[in-house]
Structure formats: structure tokens, C-alpha cells
Amino acid sequence: MCLSAAVALVGCGKSSFQDSQLVGSWKLEIPAADLRLTYYSNHTWVMIASSPDKSVPTGSEFGGWKLNGNQLMLVTSCGMDNKPVNNREMGTIVKLNDSVLVFANNGAAKNSTFHKSDAPAAAIPDKELARKLVGSWMFSYTNVPQAMGVLLYSAYQPNGTAHWQGTIYKDAQSHPAPKASGTWLVQNGYMLTAITNFESNQFGATKQSRDQILSVTDSQFTYKDEQGSIQKVLRRK
């Protein structure tokens, strides 16, 4: 599933809208899945797709947005398959108020209509989120211009302990990232982690973080960090 498959954003209109009107979560109910688009005030967005049907693709994709009058540009930086992309889509908002967001679909019989939602994703109890997060997760990042990258692993145990390790790549060389351990818990939809032991003292004694959980599936964990950036990691097989 991709964003363009959910909302084909083209058309024209005469209305002018403000960023503040778009900020928030919008829900599109389709037969096989629950799909939500959340626009943040820092001009990032995330789409979460969930479904009880195991044959339906679920997960998230995210990127940036810019509104100019009634013209909306969406830049997708990470797709549903977790591969980095740089897709740009321009579209027109036909209607936007406190409860409804309508896009004109190119060549479709009807417009795509979203309804305002109070939450960026379906409410899931902390206990269930914690159960889903138990296990090992992988985060990878590559900076092509600087010929460097990282591959990091996070392991969350049922007893509330956590371990972090990974590899740093630079040119044709690689070396292990400093190992770390600490604690983790889920509270009010946020993941709280505290690194209490570093293999190296390069980063200090303790590092704490509080990240908003956006989505957890069997294969992906999507969250919004304290700096407002959206991140996604894959479950390690």
C-alpha cells in the first residue's frame, strides 16, 4: 500500500486554507483496513494502516508536507516497505473544516473523504503495546555522500531490561558501536527508555528518552521522537 493508492491528490479549487486547519489526525475507513493520516505542526506527516486481515499490508509511511492556499505538497521519505524514497505529490484540498477533509481524486467517481480523529492511531492499552514491543528491533541509516552508515539493534526484554548494540560503517571499514544496557517501559502510549550502562563513557552516564508510539505491527515499530522526527525500525528476524 502506498499513499498515492489511498489518496490521489489532484484537482483545482479556489479556497485558501491555513496550516493549523490541517494539523491533526484524519481517518479514512476502507473495507479491508483502518487508515489514518496525521499532519504535525512541524510539517511532517505519518500514515498508519492497520487491519485484522493478515493478508492486508499494514504499517506506516511518512514524510513532509507543505500547504499553499489549497494546494498540498506531500513528500514521502519512507515507504510502507521501510525503504527510503523521495516521492513528491501535489494535490488540491476541496473541503477542510473541523471535522472533514476532502481531496479531489483524479478520474475517480468520488472524492476521498477523511474524518477528524482524536488520536493518530487506534487506542491500544499500554500492556498490549509492551507485549508487542518485546523482542529485537533493527534500525539502519546510510549517508551516501559521506560514505557512512549505522546498523543498530535494540532488544527489549519482558522484565523491563533493554540492550543496544550495532555497527558503524565508514568507507570500506566498519567497527562495533558501543554496547549499552538499561530499562524500558510503556506509559500512556509513550515508550520510556533509560540507558544506564555504556560500554564506553563517550555518551555520559545516563540517557533517557520518551518517544510517542505511533504503530507496532509484527514487523514494524513506528514512533515520534522527542525532537519531533518520525522513525521506523524493523523487527529482527
Image (tube, helix red, strand yellow):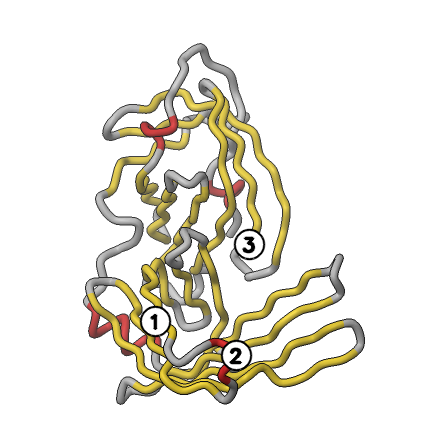
Q: Could you classify mark 2 by the number of other residues whose Cα lies within 10 Å: few (under 14), some (14-19), or many (20 or more)?
A: few
172 and 73: which one is in front? 172
Q: Mark 2 falls on what kind of element?
A: helix
Q: Amino acid at mark 3?
A: Gly
> What residue is rendered at 24% in x and 30% in y?
99
Measured from the top left, where is residue 213 in percent x and y?
A: 33, 62
Please give the label number shown on residue 208.
1
What residue is at 44 percent from the left and 10 percent from the top?
Answer: 14
In the picture shown, does residue 62 fall above or below 109? below
User: Badge 2 is on which residue?
Assistant: 202
**Measured Cα–Cα span from mark 1 to mark 2:** 15 Å
Q: Is residue 233 above or below residue 212?
A: below
Q: Residue at x 45, y 20 (%)?
A: 70
Kind of element beneath mark 3: loop
Tag 2: amino acid: Gln
Mark 1–mark 3 Cα distance, whole angstroms, equals: 29 Å
Image check: 134 left or right of 150?
Answer: left
On screen, 177 above or below 96?
Answer: below
Q: Earlier in the sequence, mark 1 or mark 3?
A: 3
Q: Which residue is mark 3?
A: 79
Q: Are marks 3 and 2 in contact (CB under 8 Å)?
A: no
Taking the image as shown, residue 200 lies to the left or right of residue 27, namely: right
Select label 1 or label 2 by which is in front.
2
- Amino acid type at mark 1: Gln
Q: Residues within 10 Å of mark 3 (few under 14, many from 20)?
A: many
Q: Earlier in the sequence, mark 3 or mark 2?
A: 3
Comparing labels 3 and 2, the label whose residue is closer to the camera: 2
Q: Name the spot of residue 45 as percent of width and height, x first.
A: 43, 44
Q: Choose top left, top right, bottom left or bottom right for residue 160.
A: bottom left
> In the rendered view, would you say 21 is above or below 224?
above
